[in-house]
Amino acid sequence: MASTPQQVKEWGRPAAPTRRDVGAALAALSEEDLVRLRAIARLRARSLPGGMSWSDLLHEAVLRALTGARPWPPGVPLLAFLAGVMRSLCDEQWRRHRRHDHLPTPHDSGGVDDPERACAAAEALAAIQRLFASDAAALMVITGLISGMAAEDIRRHYGLTAVEYDTTRRRIRRTLLRHGLAWSWP
Amino acid sequence: MTRMSYPRSGLTALLDALERELLAAPVEDVRDAWRETGRARNIVCEEVRALLKEAIAASEDGSAATPPPDTCAGLDRLLGVSRKLRPEAHSHPRASAVPAWSCRRH
């Protein structure tokens, strides 16, 4: 029997990683990757409702990857995939929180009609800015990123040279990693 | 109107950018940050590894009843409400399904 073009396309596609693949990839994560994962989870969990901790968030993301509830796309690095799962879990957690409190779930509103989430976001932004309170250049970059500016726009807007911008980004990374390792945020 | 007027979209833009920074952080930056915190390297790693192992064990326990993607049940653990204590849990159409959010063994 001749194969359909669709079948040929499916066969040519890399197979989705299995649970065993995910488990093996998790076991093979380097110490540096574990630190990155922890820092990302802490960053994302900072503004969540319902007392959800970074470890709850990371645990849930890993579990969903392992069970296949969130399939790991072929070719995507594990850390980037888990970061994406955590990102969407945060939105899910807010939806659940609103549903549990019998509040209307905003649709396509950009969150402007969700005062609790806006307040939590403002608090998280303030906490991140406090991390860089003593670093004027970092605050400029952070403010640019909040405004959705691209690297080149930030540099031009704040008059930073390429070297200044890169060293500032490095300080931001290290500060985030340090706080990802620490017990608490300021 | 700037994104500062909409903290949620501002936070989303910032977190996405910072996440990219963390994912792309050179190994030397991670090691430097490690040194600066003074926290024992093995303690931090063991903490995350234990969490991963816990998730692997939980996935093996619940492998026969994998929840569908983005299912809507099971807020209870997160809000600290026992399903047994919540009357509507019994009448909810998905009450008998595996909760969407897992139960961690603390």
Image (cartoon, helix red, strand yellow):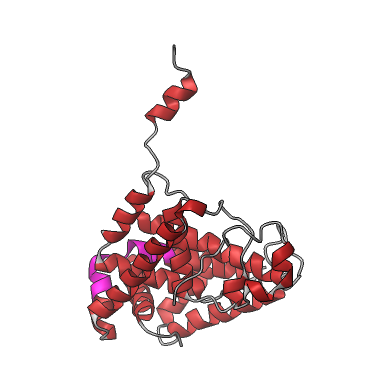
At a point 33% along the width and 76% down the height, the residue shown is B47
Viewer-proximal residue, A181 or B53?
B53
Q: Is residue A69 left or right of residue B86?
A: left
Viewer-proximal residue, A77 or A19?
A19
| Residue A39 drawn above or below residue A88 | below
At a point 48% along the width and 79% down the height, the residue shown is A128
Viewer-proximal residue, A67 or B14?
A67
Is residue A13 in view? yes
Verify whether residue B27 appears in magenta.
Answer: yes
At a point 66% along the width and 57% down the height, the residue shown is B94
Quarter location, residue A38 = bottom left
| Residue A2 drawn above or below residue A133 | above
| Residue A47 drawn above or below residue A28 | below
Across and down, in percent, residue A153 comes to: 48, 62
Quarter location, residue B12 = bottom right
Across and down, in percent, residue B87 comes to: 73, 71
Q: Is residue A108 left or right of residue B51?
A: right
Is residue A154 in view? no
Across and down, in percent, residue A133 comes to: 45, 86
Please give the count of numbered marks on the rendered protein: 0
Point out the stretch of residues depicted in magenta.
B19-31
Of helix, strand and loop, which mostly describes the magenta segment? helix
Quarter of the picture containing the N terminus of chain A is top left
Viewer-proximal residue, B3 or A16?
A16
Verify whether residue A30 appears in magenta.
Answer: no
